Image: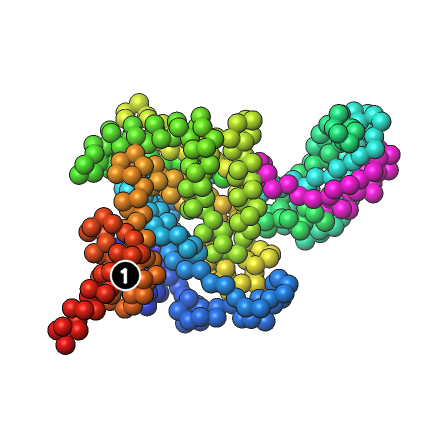
Amino acid sequence: MTLDSSLPKFRTLTPADRLEHLAQKLPLSKDDLRLVAEPGALPLETADSMIENVIGKFELPYAVAGYFQINGKDVLVPMAVEEPSVVAAASYMAKLVRANGGFHTSSSGPIMRAQVQIMNLQDPYGARHAILQQHQDIIDIANSRDKVLLGLGGGCKDIEVHVFPDTARGAMVVVHLIVDVRDAMGANTVNTMAEAVAGRLEQITGGRVRLRILSNLADLRLARAHLRLTPELLQTSEYSGVDVINGIVDAYEFAAVDPYRAATHNKGIMNGIDPIVVATGNDWRAVEAGAHAYACRSGHYTSLSTWEIAGNGDLVGTLEMPMPLGLVGGATKTHPLAQLSLKILNVASAQELAEISVAVGLAQNLAALRALSTEGIQRGHMALHARNIALLAGAKGDDIAWVAQKMVEARDVRADLATELLQKKSTLNGDNA
């Protein structure tokens, strides 16, 4: 069955009807549908085995973004997130990009780094040379700890040796193990390898090993996404496509030069990426850490994405960033909803998951820049936030949509207004009784 990721009028359906619609598009079993529809997808005993001191479970809204077409393949994207407008914005941008060929992605191999810190050295550069002379021995020791990974074509492939000759604690040499982790995120694998080679590195250098740990700056494990939009696709009733494109590029340049703006700009990118990472049981903290460190690689915190105008006037957006995601190990294997998310995504490798995630991040970035460069971020965001405010005021059932609509029409979304509207409606209903 070929998937069509279009979701027309999806937001007008009830949650149950949305799930039924997805069931017609995806090969989901009754048990799969029950995981989403009913509370308690994660059994308490499973949760208790995942982390320590468990007292219960914490749920987030679980949604699906539609219209994504990536390298010619339609993809439905599960997202776990609490913030209004994220799923809607990503889906709408995907719909625009779809009309112009969709997203195009690529990625480097699933390469992670482990770091081994060596101290108490009188001749750090000599130590570096000695380590590199024994590089194959070190690689062999590292690979002796994971024969399964080696059999899958992964394993430690190389080493790097970095010298810091003058730190506050004296000379320091740091050995990087360069490890192909295949479809794992790889933290446990590279940490084990780093610990395995520590003794041998002490023998070679005469120094003392301190830290043995992965780096979350996964700069050898990059995923990239690219999109192109014509001015016609970006035109609105109030703004020409050319104006929108110029506004987006101006907003990007602001983020490129100013770290205060870049922090919020990049947060918008992560608005799209983090919900996928969470939904698939991956380590969103590792992804966040790597993203922001990568944004500083030039010595200046800047935009992760780039936006430019092509010779024919089209808007061209690109995003390249570290994306250390896995399909095996950790919560991706133990959490039932993480497994269901991977089933919905229908990905064949961790690299494909990484590429989808970066495409969604680029879509989310486009949505924010488009809003900021036209009507402002609050107009669309607050319209979606109005339902939350209505709930906060005590609205239930059909009253939620009614109160939200009244506030949107007034362009005034406030908790006290929602309460006032509910009281007026209650009074009117009482008079009509």
| Residue at (51, 33) in percent of width and height | 295
Range covered by the magenta-colored residues: 193-220
Indicate whether 169 appears above or below 28: above
Looking at the image, residue 47 sits to the left or right of residue 200; the answer is: left
- On whether residue 204 falls in the magenta region, the answer is yes
Quarter where residue 179 is shown: top right
- Could you say where residue 298 lies in the image, as x and y percent from the top left? 54, 26
Quarter where residue 163 is shown: top right
- Could you say where residue 318 lies in the image, as x and y percent from the top left? 41, 34
- On whether residue 195 falls in the magenta region, the answer is yes
Q: Is residue 176 visible?
A: yes
> Residue extending furthest left?
432
Q: Quadrant of the C terminus?
A: bottom left
Indicate whether 306 appears above or below 327: above
Quarter where residue 396 is shown: bottom left
Q: Quadrant of the N terminus?
A: bottom left
Three-letter code for the amino acid on which mark 1 is drawn: Thr
| Residue at (78, 36) in percent of width and height | 118
- Could you say where residue 147 lies in the image, as x and y percent from the top left? 71, 52
